[in-house]
Image: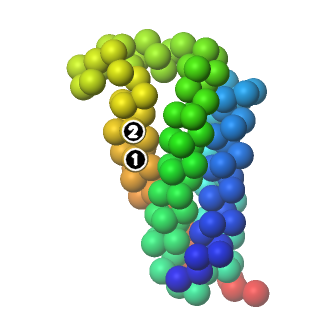
């Protein structure tokens, strides 16, 4: 397990956490994540000592921590530029009217889901990419 690699790659998540608060709108964010996943999968395949899926999965979990934490700490600024997310939050039955608490539930669910995706990307990249 290469924890340094996981933490280094999770800096993409930390960057995206702040970027989505201050200057990346949600209609652009979905374009950037696949690019980040491809870069991370390649770097995992190149640098991880095996267990590519696990490295990808854990990277996304750390990303989830960064993103959820930053969005909660900067909630007012984040939500002021992400009105669609607030509208979606208000339509949910779980914790209706409590968008911060919803983030605490939905954030990890998205982290697990994206972890499976990045894990699969990393596993496939591990089969395709030759080590240095």
Q: Are marks 1 and 2 in contact (CB under 8 Å)?
A: yes
Per the image, label 2 sits on a secondary structure element best described as helix
Local crowd size for mark 1, using a 10 Å CA cut-off: few (<14), some (14–19), many (≥20): many
What residue is shown at x 34% (from left), y 39% (from top)?
105
Residue at the limit of the structure toward the front, as seen here: 73
Q: Which residue is mark 1?
A: 108
Rendered location of residue 64, percent (x, y):
50, 49
Asked whether the viewer can see residue 129, the reply is no
What residue is shown at x 59% (from left), y 80% (from top)?
2
In the rendered view, would you say 126 is above or below 70? Answer: below
What residue is shown at x 52% (from left), y 71% (from top)?
55
Local crowd size for mark 2, using a 10 Å CA cut-off: few (<14), some (14–19), many (≥20): some
In the rendered view, would you say 107 is above or below 81? Answer: below
Which of the 4 image quarters holds residue 23? top right
Q: Which residue is mark 2?
A: 104
Rendered location of residue 67, percent (x, y):
56, 43
What residue is shown at x 58% (from left), y 87% (from top)?
49
């Amino acid at each position: 397990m290469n924890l340094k690699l996981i933490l280094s790659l999770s800096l993409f998540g930390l960057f995206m956490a702040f970027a989505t608060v201050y200057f990346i709108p949600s209609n652009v964010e979905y374009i950037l994540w696949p690019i980040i996943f491809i870069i991370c999968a390649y770097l995992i395949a190149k640098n991880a000592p095996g267990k590519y899926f696990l490295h990808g999965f854990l990277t996304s979990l750390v990303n989830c921590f960064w993103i959820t934490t930053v969005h909660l700490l900067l909630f007012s600024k984040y939500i002021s530029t992400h009105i669609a997310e607030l509208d979606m939050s208000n339509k949910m039955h779980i914790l209706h009217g409590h968008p911060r608490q919803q983030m605490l539930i939905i954030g990890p669910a998205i982290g697990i889901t994206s972890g499976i995706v990045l894990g699969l990307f990393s596993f496939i990249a591990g089969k395709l990419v030759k080590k240095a």
